[in-house]
Image (cartoon, rainbow, N blue to C red):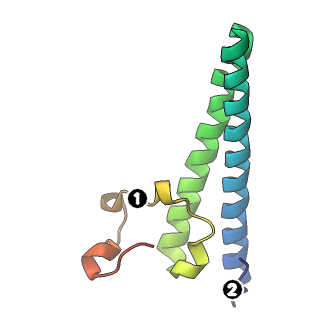
Amino acid sequence: MSTNHIVKSYDEDLDLLRSKLSEMGNEVEDQISKANQALLERDNGLAELVIISDQKVNVLQQEVEELGVRILATRSPVAQDLRGSLPDSKWHLNWSELPITPPTSRGIHPI
């Protein structure tokens, strides 16, 4: 879902967000596979590797959240811009930390 905007950096921000989300999803998928294998084979070494690799997912999650908040705060995106980028489970931003009024208090509801 690519929409070209007048400001090229906006498209680049959205592309970076999609890329980081994809990378994070791939890493989690790999972790789940390895965790299942570690359980089935009772492989403590592999289980430890899964635990250690979780730090990478934590870093990616932090980067995604920071980029998402920056996009929301600086670009005022419309739903179409973010629909393919933000996962439903993370659409619960802590609005009290942002210098803006939450959309729901203005009669606007997230998708």
Name the N-terminal-most of marks 1 and 2: 2
**Quarter assignment of residue 9:** bottom right
CB-based contact (under 8 Å), mark 1 and mark 2:
no
On-image quarter of the N terminus: bottom right
Which residue is rendered at x = 69% and y = 8% of the image?
Answer: 42
Which residue is rendered at x = 58% and y = 60% of the image?
Answer: 67
Residue 31 shows in this picture: yes
Identity of the amino acid at label 2?
Val
Q: Quote the CA–CA distance across marks 1 and 2.
A: 25 Å
Which residue is rendered at x = 55% and y = 59% of the image?
Answer: 87
Identity of the amino acid at label 1?
Leu
Q: Count residues near mark 2 (Cα–Cα under 10 Å), then give few for <14, some for 14-19, many for 20+.
A: few
Look at the numbered disc 1 and give the secondary structure of its residue: loop
Q: Which residue is mark 1?
A: 93
Q: Is 50 located above or below residue 7 in the figure?
A: above
On-image quarter of the C terminus: bottom left
Instruction: Provide residue 5's location: percent of width, then percent of height.
Output: 69, 87
Look at the numbered disc 2 and give the secondary structure of its residue: loop
Q: Residue furthest left?
A: 105
Q: Which residue is mark 2?
A: 7
Q: Is 21 located above or below residue 83 in the figure?
A: above
Query: Which marked residue is nearer to the observer: mark 1 or mark 2?
Result: 1
Q: Residue furthest front?
A: 40
Q: Residue furthest bottom?
A: 6
Instruction: Provide residue 23's location: percent of width, then percent of height.
Output: 73, 49
Residue 77 shows in this picture: no
Instruction: Provide residue 15's location: percent of width, then percent of height.
Output: 72, 68
Instruction: Provide residue 27's location: percent of width, then percent of height.
Output: 72, 40
Q: Nearer the viewer, residue 23 or 111?
A: 111
